């Protein structure tokens, strides 16, 4: 995108993770002057832009969820394969860690969030097991958590052998870890906040696009775009999501669940 806006154009990159800028700097090359990093939550994008004396934008791309570098860094606690702390915060400078949330949350609320954010079956049983084991001091890191959750298999065909030789259901682990990450970072609430400010931060005829990786995110985006179209705020929206091609999924397996939906603001 950077070559397309140069010269004279600007791209603002917003990320909760302050380490994102470090990963980006080596890739900016000759276009560094066109890129501006904003450390913060896109739920407050209007405020972040105003601090740069920008009030509306020509286009907005929201790439939702966690990034691959965060998943691959065991110290962040996002992965059920690699041992790490019970953290899961996208911004490690603020907010409650997963450990702090597990200490306080009741079983009923935890079960509700597992079902809502991860489409987890047996959410009540898994929530009770997580809470009991955490309070007993048996869940001290992500490896301990994966051992507790891994007992709950949805399909035998979805099992895989982990390093210690145990057979674990990868799908249940992925669903639970996803749900806990969304809970820690309040991701769906932040998405709703971003959508609420779209009419004010998009210029007339501007395009907004969302890349979602979770059914809950996609439902919110789909319904919200339809509402904005009905209200006349948008002139058109995508009828169906754009999915990655077979070739893209082969090159980037993590893209397999991605859905892109877009909308255009009215003049």
Image (tube, rainbow, N blue to C red):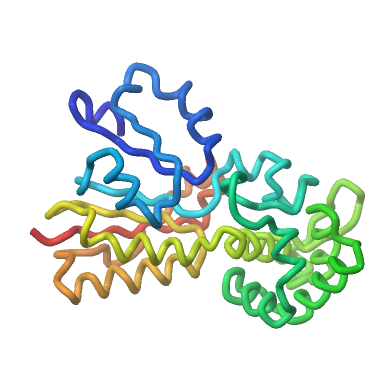
Where is residue 188 shown, x and y percent of the image? 48, 65
Q: Quadrant of residue 174?
A: bottom right
Please, which residue is most extreme toward the top here? 30
Q: Is residue 226 above or below residue 94?
A: below
Position of 93 with respect to 204 (left or right) is right
User: Which quarter of the figure is the N terminus placed in?
Assistant: top left
Q: Please tell me which residue lies in front, 57 or 143.
A: 57
Viewer can see residue 122: no
Looking at the image, is 116 positioned above or below residue 197?
A: below
**Residue 146: % across, % down:** 80, 59
Residue at image coords 71%, 73%: 105
Where on the picture, by quarter, is residue 133? bottom right
Task: Please tell me which residue is depicted at 86% across the width and 59% down the height of the picture.
Answer: 167
Total numbered labels placed on residues in the image: 0
Image quadrant containing the C terminus: bottom left
> Where residue 30 sits: x, y (%)?
34, 17
Image height of 39 relative to 212, above or below: above
Report the residue at 78% width, 61% height from top.
159
Q: Position of residue 219 (x, y in %)?
A: 42, 71
Q: 127 or 103: which is nearer to us?
A: 103
Residue at the limit of the structure toward the left, as seen here? 267
Q: Is residue 149 visible?
A: yes
Residue in the image at 19% along x and 46% along y: 58
């Amino acid at each position: 995108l950077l070559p397309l806006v140069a010269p004279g154009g600007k791209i603002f990159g917003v990320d909760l993770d302050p380490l994102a800028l470090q990963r980006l700097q080596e890739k900016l090359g000759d276009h560094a002057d066109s890129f501006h990093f904003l450390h913060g939550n896109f739920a407050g994008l209007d405020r972040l832009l105003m601090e740069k004396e920008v009030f509306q934008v020509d286009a907005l791309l929201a790439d939702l969820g966690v990034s691959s570098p965060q998943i691959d860094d065991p110290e962040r606690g996002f992965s059920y394969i690699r041992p790490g702390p019970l953290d899961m915060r996208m911004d490690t400078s603020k907010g409650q860690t997963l450990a702090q949330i597990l200490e306080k949350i009741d079983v009923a609320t935890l079960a509700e969030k597992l079902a809502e954010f991860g489409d987890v079956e047996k959410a009540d049983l898994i929530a009770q097991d997580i809470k009991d084991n955490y309070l007993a001091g048996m869940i001290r890191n992500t490896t301990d958590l994966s051992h507790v959750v891994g007992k709950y298999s949805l399909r035998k065909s979805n099992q895989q052998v982990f390093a210690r030789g145990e057979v674990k259901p990868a799908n249940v682990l992925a669903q639970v870890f996803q749900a806990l990450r969304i809970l820690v970072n309040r991701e769906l609430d932040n998405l709703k906040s971003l959508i609420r400010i779209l009419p004010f931060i998009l210029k007339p005829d501007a395009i907004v696009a969302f890349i979602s990786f979770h059914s809950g995110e996609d439902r919110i985006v789909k319904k919200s775009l339809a509402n904005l179209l009905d209200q006349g705020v948008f002139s058109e929206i995508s009828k169906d999501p754009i999915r990655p091609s077979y070739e893209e999924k082969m090159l980037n397996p993590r893209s397999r669940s991605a859905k892109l939906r877009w909308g255009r603001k009215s003049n």
